Image (cartoon, rainbow, N blue to C red):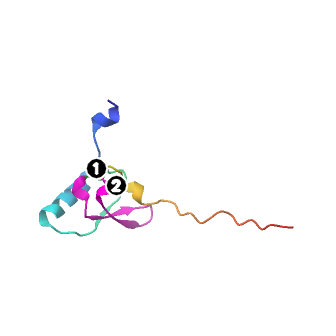
Amino acid sequence: MARSVKKGPFADQSLLKAVDAMNAQGSKAVIKTWSRRSTIFPSFVGHTIAVHDGRKHVPVYITEDMVGHKLGEFVATRTFRGHKDNERKG
């Protein structure tokens, strides 16, 4: 067994508390987080979590397919502006 499997999944404690509180109340407000390294748990499904991309929070709706992945996988941190346009000279 690999060491990472023994350690188990990680999720930020404040994020877990917020999701658990919302599940207990039955509400579905947007949760802001800076924790891109948190693993998505089954209790997150159906919630919208605003994940920080370095300059703003991007809302991500959590589905069942996302369980087990990290929050940061679904928010890009870099903007691709295209390759340099080379002018062809004849």
Q: Is residue 51 left or right of residue 82?
A: left
Q: Residue at x 80, y 66 (%)?
A: 88
Q: Amino acid at mark 1?
A: Ala
Q: Establish if 38 lies above or below 76.
A: above
Find residue 47 and report its horizontal and vertical position in percent.
26, 64
Quadrant of res 57: bottom left
Find residue 39 and report its horizontal and vertical position in percent.
31, 50
Q: Is residue 21 left or right of residue 60?
A: left
Residue position for label 2: 35
Q: Are marks 2 and 1 in contact (CB under 8 Å)?
A: yes
Q: Residue at x 51, y 60 (%)?
A: 78
Residue farthest to the front, as pictured: 65
Residue position for label 1: 11
Q: Amino acid at mark 2?
A: Ser
Find residue 37 and report its horizontal and vertical position in percent.
36, 50
Badge 1 crowding class, 10 Å Cα cut-off, few under 14, some 14 to 19, many 20 or more, is some
Disc 2 element: loop
Q: Residues under labels 2 and 1: Cα distance? A: 8 Å
Disc 1 element: loop
Find residue 48 and report its horizontal and vertical position in percent.
29, 66
Residue 57 in the magenta stretch? The answer is yes
Q: What's drawn in magenta, residue-wise?
A: 42-67
Q: Is residue 58 left or right of residue 84?
A: left
Q: Residue at x 46, y 60 (%)?
A: 76
